[in-house]
Image (tube, rainbow, N blue to C red):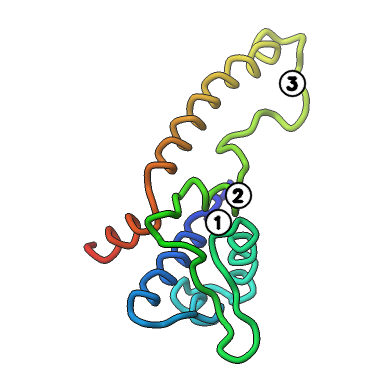
Amino acid sequence: MAANSRLTVATHALAWLALAHRRGHEVLTSEQVAASVKSNAVIIRRSLGDLRRAGLVEVRHGAGAGWRLARAPEEITLLQVHDAVDARPPFALHHGEPNLECPVGRGIRPALSGVYGRVEEAMRRELAGATVADVLRETLTS
């Protein structure tokens, strides 16, 4: 099973927009963002669209079209980014009902639900404590 990279791609895009703004570029096109991520511009536009709906970026149409942050990078937490692009919990239970005649099948859901809930709480707490500015600062010092 492949890991989901939506949070990583969205955070990369936001950090690049923040750096571009710092360097005097008011907006970046989706193609410019895609070049940094090394991805397809259509995928980047989808991600930026999710971020726009969450109020994290703005888009300008027409002459000088492009994307920019809707607020300062210090005000955008990774939890907000996560919730904008992939609000699913990190782990899921069975898609179907396990065999309730089996002692493991009968008890696995309640056993894992508590563990998964605590993992999600810890993940959300960590993401809430980090901002796009933090990521950009760490990126530039690496």
Q: Is residue 94 left or right of residue 71?
A: right
- Left or right: residue 31 compared with residue 24: right
- Disc number placed over residue 6 in the picture, else none: 1
Q: In this rendering, would 16 be left or right of 105? A: left
Residue designated by label 3 = 98
Q: Which picture quadrant has residue 51?
A: bottom right
Disc 2: CA contacts within 10 A as few (<14), some (14-19) or many (>=20): some
Q: Which image quarter is the C terminus in?
A: bottom left
Secondary structure beneath dot 2 equals loop
- Residue behind mark 2: 86
Image x and y of residue 46, in percent: 65, 66
Q: Are marks 2 and 1 in contact (CB under 8 Å)?
A: yes
The mark nearer the N terminus, 2 or 1, is 1
Q: Earlier in the sequence, mark 2 or mark 3?
A: 2
The residue closer to the viewer here, 137 or 111, is 137
Q: CA distance from mark 2 to mark 1?
A: 7 Å
The answer to whether 117 is drawn above or below residue 8 in the figure is above
